[in-house]
Image: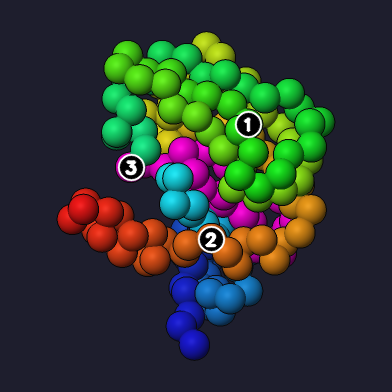
Amino acid sequence: MQNLTLKILTSKPKEARLITKSVFSIAQRFLTTYYTKAHEYIKIDEGKDSGKCGISDHAQQELGDVVFVDLPEKGRKISKGELSGAVESVKAVGNFYAPVSGKIISVNSELESTPSLINSQPEDNGWIIEVQLDDKSEINQLMNPEQYKKFLAEESHK
């Protein structure tokens, strides 16, 4: 077990004290990302039944400069693999398919005014929808980051 040492300064620097806490006791967000073969992702907070979905970095590179995102309606029920929006770039339009089934609980309205977030931060602030999962076991059919990297390498050799 690793320890993390934090130095806490008081109003009197000579009274500074060291506090050692286990890394495991510090509250952090742990995210797990899963990918589809169509280059969509879902990023799930550990212990939650919802996740943010979008297109992968690879997909945005293939599309080029994104100029418009067709966002679905919040509250809509979607099925895994269902057409759930579109991402338009200067050279192509890419369809966005739901990586999982569930209810759309949020859409990234920032993309309406700043669609380029998909280019600059595709797997962070460039997310498209947040989905409340109907069946969390569906993520078992998706690829983890290592599997996705291998998939991309195999795809590039075709």
Q: Is residue 125 in view?
A: no
Residue sitting at x 24%, y 58%: 153
Going by the numbered disc 2, the residue's amino acid type is Leu
Q: Earlier in the sequence, mark 1 or mark 3?
A: 3
The residue labelled by disc 1 is: 84
Q: Which mark is residue 142?
A: 2
Magenta stretch encompasses residue 57 = yes
Position in image of residue 16 (x %, y %): 50, 65
Mark nearest the camera among 1 and 3 is 1
Position in image of residue 127 (x %, y %): 54, 35
Most common SS among magenta residues: strand
Give the magenta-colored segment's residue range: 40-58
Residue sitting at x 43%, y 45%: 39
Q: Does residue 3 sit above or below 125 in this rendering?
A: below
Describe the colour scheme in one phrase.
Answer: rainbow
Going by the numbered disc 3, the residue's amino acid type is His
Q: Quadrant of residue 76?
A: top right
